[in-house]
Image (cartoon, grey):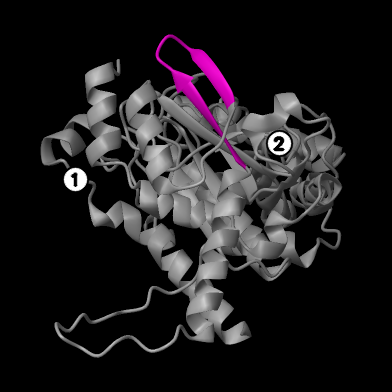
Amino acid sequence: MLDEVQLREFYEFVYPVELVTRWLSYDLSVAEKTTVITGAAPSPPVSDDVVKKEQRNIVAEGYLARREFCFTLLGDIFSRFRSYSTSAELRRDLIRCFPEKIDVGAVYTIRPNQKQSASSILPLERELVFDIDMSDYDSVRSCCSGKSICSYCWTWMACAAHVLRRILEEDFGFRYILPVFSGRRGIHLWVCDRRACKLHDDERSAIVGYLTVVVPKASRQIVVADFVNGKPIHPTIRRVQRDVIDPAFTRLFLESSESNPNSVLHPKGASVVYSTIVAALKMGSRRDVEQRFTQRVPFEEGNVLDWAYVIRALGDAAENVTAAAQILLMYPRLDEHVTTRRDHLLKLPFCVHPGTASLCCPLEWDDVVSFNPLTDAPKLQEMLLNRHMDSKWLQPLKRMLEEMSLDVMEER
């Protein structure tokens, strides 16, 4: 349970307000180095570059001021439509209000805190964001359920993040995608390209529609049926199944020992995989293969699976059917409203999750698979003890902003 003293100290000494506001204002101007020499001659007239930099700062401050912040205060008090022009202003309010959670929303037509006096206020921009929650995989994970998460089921989060990254980069050309551990059991992706921020809600919905392959509650999945029947598959789906999903499935279900409840060598994992294969065959209307498979592998509760025997039992259909089962088990399951609506709120990186006291921390893409949500994310007490946040967690966002700055300079 977080308390006032801890939160005030965290926001005063640890929380990287300046970095966060630089990001959310998209102030991408590169800081200029200056040298002060005592007794030096008067400074020359202000250059055009300095004037332009000051103008960009004014624009950035105006952009930040129209961004919505939302505080969840102790006692579950929800305070929306807050607005800040500078990092100093935001830090003062964080120390004064000590929220246990900070959400951030869209950039509006006017400052959100002036909405009561305005005839209309409309969301204009927001990053294209994706929220992947582990609880959406409860029907197929055997190690945990609900709010619980472990190193085994993090494999689903890492797989989903890499699938989305692959599609967003290769099919849509987005370049600046920041993965962020939610602090408990999920992962958020922030697509920060300027053209992503400017997408309208219907354009965001179209992207979600393009990405949606598996609808967990649907009885018929067209892509799954096409896999089972060996029909042509969209090249993107085929690539992510082969390059991302298959290795993740192998690590989680096939290569782990019986101590992992998701393994085919554990009764729970074996039951999930077996029932998924049968479900895929039904979706593909392959009664012939289904009948042969269930006769050769008469699964009962408490059984485990010999994967080599499963492959033999599926015969010529093995490659297609196992690919279909992998899609059902591992493909990203999205909370579409988080992505499609610009006015939707999402937890701001570097917050502390009120339920776990773990940092909502950006990750390096190379570390997403190996990240352990139970042991790797820094805890509030650790950061307060050091009065410091390890630069490891700041670096992913810093690097992204530097790359964006270089691109802006090249465009000029």
Q: Which mark is residue 72?
A: none
Amino acid carrying label 1: it is: His
Say which residue appears at 32% left-offset and 32% top-offset. Answer: 358
Q: What element does badge 2 sit on?
A: loop
Secondary structure character of the magenta stretch overall: strand
Q: Position of residue 396 (x, y in %)?
A: 39, 60
Q: Nearer the viewer, residue 339 or 79?
A: 79
Q: Position of residue 289 (x, y in %)?
A: 78, 43
Give 118 or 380, whichever is nearer the viewer.
Answer: 118
Residue 370 image offset from top left, x and y in percent: 35, 52
Quadrant of image for the N terminus: top left
Q: Name the residue under label 2.
A: 343
Residues under labels 2 and 1: Cα distance? Answer: 33 Å
Q: Which mark is residue 388?
A: 1
As displayed, is residue 46 above or below residue 2? below
Q: Which of 72 and 242 is in front in this view?
A: 72
- What residue is rendered at 58% in x and 64% in y? 243
Question: Going 39% across and 23% down the picture, which residue do you hit?
Answer: 97
Label 1 packing within 10 angstroms: few (<14), some (14-19), many (20+): some
Q: Which residue lies furthest to the top in this view?
A: 75
User: Which picture quadrant has residue 19?
Assistant: bottom left
Is the residue under label 1 in contact with that under label 2 (CB below 8 Å)? no
Where residue 78 sits: x, y (%)?
54, 17
Give the position of the C terminus as an image quadrant. bottom right
Crowding at label 2, few (<14), some or many (≥20) Cα neighbours within 10 Å?
many
Q: Is residue 293 left or right of residue 25?
A: right
Magenta residues (range):
67-80
| Label 1: element kind | loop
Q: Left or right: 392 with respect to 241?
A: left
Asked if the magenta segment contains residue 78, the reply would be: yes
